[in-house]
Amino acid sequence: ALEIHFKGKNIADVLDMTIEEAMSFFANVPSIYNKMKTLNEVGLGYMRLGQPATTLSGGEAQRVKLATELARRATGRTMYILDEPTTGLHFADIDRLLQVLQRLVDNGNTIVVIEHNLEVIKSADWIIDLGPAGGDAGGQVIAQGTPDDVAENEQSFTGHFLQRMFNEEIALAKAHHAENQVVVG
């Protein structure tokens, strides 16, 4: 099998490619390219094609399943339940994953995410904050509502951190606006 080549590469060379590299390599093979593109969109572009499935983290395995679902014909009637899908992701990959999830919602699907990442939490349409702590000390609904609603709930640790995040974003926006003002006198 190693004697057979495609575009100068044998099967071992192809299996050693990252998903991102495979996107370029298979750009003219739509059936492969589209699958690689979807895997890349969910933040798995760094993975090698030949990586054994048994070595995937829980978050990586979830994102492979999510990519598989995204590749299917959308019904707009599916509920996806994801448990900490951003684990181990770089900020840029989290943003890409959020875009993919939003695309699923825009197509009429429902997404339920168990997550601790505030970037993900603040982008939710509705939050159910459980607490007051983890494990045996948790399990009670502390707050629920939009991110703004939860941020205003003084009983919610998540709300406290969301409020701080929102305040920092407002301060940054004001500072950026002040830098770009032109005074004419």
Image (cartoon, rainbow, N blue to C red):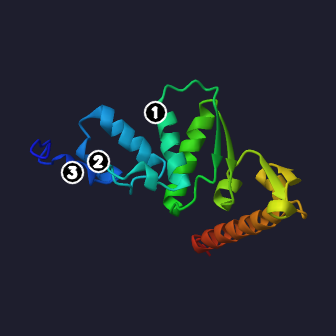
Are the residues at dot 3 and dot 1 in contact (C-beta closer than 8 Å)? no
Q: Nearer the viewer, residue 150 or 132?
A: 132
Q: Secondary structure at mark 2?
A: helix
The amino acid type, in three-letter code, at marker 1 is: Ala
Q: CA distance from mark 3 to mark 1?
A: 26 Å
Are the residues at dot 2 and dot 1 in contact (C-beta closer than 8 Å)? no
- Residue 95 visible? The answer is no
Residue 39 lies in what quarter of the image? top left
Q: CA distance from mark 2 to mark 1?
A: 17 Å
- Residue 138 visible? The answer is yes
The amino acid type, in three-letter code, at marker 3 is: Ala
Label at residue 71? 1
Q: Nearer the viewer, residue 87 or 91?
A: 87
Q: CA distance from mark 3 to mark 2?
A: 13 Å
Which residue appears farthest toward the left when viewing the image?
Answer: 3
Q: Residue 53 location in percent, x, y?
A: 43, 49
Residue located at (60% from left, 70% from top):
176
Say if 101 sits above or below 148 in the image: above
Count neighbours of disc 3 (C-alpha within 10 A) and say few if under 14, some if 14 to 19, many if 20 or more: few
Say if 173 sits above or below 52 in the image: below
Q: Residue 26 location in percent, x, y?
A: 25, 41
Q: Residue 33 location in percent, x, y?
A: 32, 39
Which mark is first along the chain, 1 or 2? 2
Say if 124 sits above or below 168 in the image: above
Q: Secondary structure at mark 3?
A: helix
Residue located at (20% from left, 52% from top):
13
Residue 101 lies in what quarter of the image? top right
Residue of label 2: 22
The amino acid type, in three-letter code, at marker 2 is: Ala
Count neighbours of disc 2 (C-alpha within 10 A) and say few if under 14, some if 14 to 19, many if 20 or more: many
Residue of label 3: 12
Which residue appears farthest toward the front when viewing the image?
Answer: 54
